[in-house]
Amino acid sequence: QVQLVESGGGSVQAGGSLRLSCEASGYVYSSYCMAWFRQAPGKEREGVAFIYTGGGSAYYADSVKGRFTLSRGSAKNTVYLQMNSLKPEDTTMYYCATAAICRYSDHKIVDSGMNYWGKGTLVTISS
């Protein structure tokens, strides 16, 4: 059974930084996609970034490009989302998700193909 555990959420002022972590367990493939999504109440879920555990560059949503950096840990089942220059509009729940393949369309990361999801971690940015 695949499990994803997120950590690192919290509250900071605008302009500050946070680092989220996601650790996956139970995945049988040597390389898979790990992604971050976020969803505010009443809004559509938004893909933030994804990366493959086996290598390659991360892909970012336009809304976070240049501010967020997604990286792999030394243990390939862990990824880190470094979030800098945070804005109040970044406030929401952030979820880690995995799939064999991540997809994007019209510069938006597609969530329908994600197989497993974490429970989420809350990020709150005050102005």
Image (tube, helix red, strand yellow):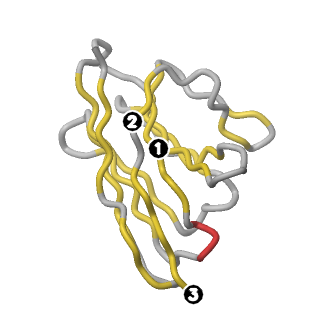
Q: Position of residue 88 (x, y in %)?
A: 60, 76
Q: Residues within 10 Å of mark 3 (few under 14, many from 20)?
A: few
Tell me the number on the disc at residue 95.
1
Residue type, numbered disc 2: Gly
| Residue 24 placement: quadrant | top left
- Residue extending furthest left? 75
Q: Position of residue 57 (x, y in %)?
A: 48, 44
Residue type, numbered disc 3: Ser
Residue at horizontal 76 percent and vertical 34 percent from the top: 105
Residue at horizontal 43 percent and vertical 34 percent from the top: 34
Q: Earlier in the sequence, mark 3 or mark 2?
A: 2
**SS for callout 2:** loop
Q: Position of residue 77 (x, y in %)?
A: 26, 33
**Residue 88 vertical position relative to residue 68 in the rendered view, above or below:** below
* Residue 127 left/right relative to 22: right
Q: Position of residue 5 (x, y in %)?
A: 29, 39
Residue at horizontal 55 percent and vertical 66 percent from the top: 91
Q: CA distance from mark 1 to mark 2?
A: 6 Å
Tell me the number on the disc at residue 127.
3
**Residue 1 vertical position relative to residue 46 in the rendered view, above or below:** above
Q: Residues within 10 Å of mark 1 (few under 14, many from 20)?
A: many
| Residue 33 placement: quadrant | top left
Q: Earlier in the sequence, mark 1 or mark 2?
A: 1
Q: Residues within 10 Å of mark 2 (few under 14, many from 20)?
A: some
**SS for callout 1:** strand
**SS for callout 3:** loop
Q: Earlier in the sequence, mark 3 or mark 1?
A: 1
Which residue is under mark 2? Answer: 118
Residue type, numbered disc 1: Tyr
Residues at circles 1 and 2 in contact by the CB criterion of under 8 Å: yes
Tell me the number on the disc at residue 119.
none
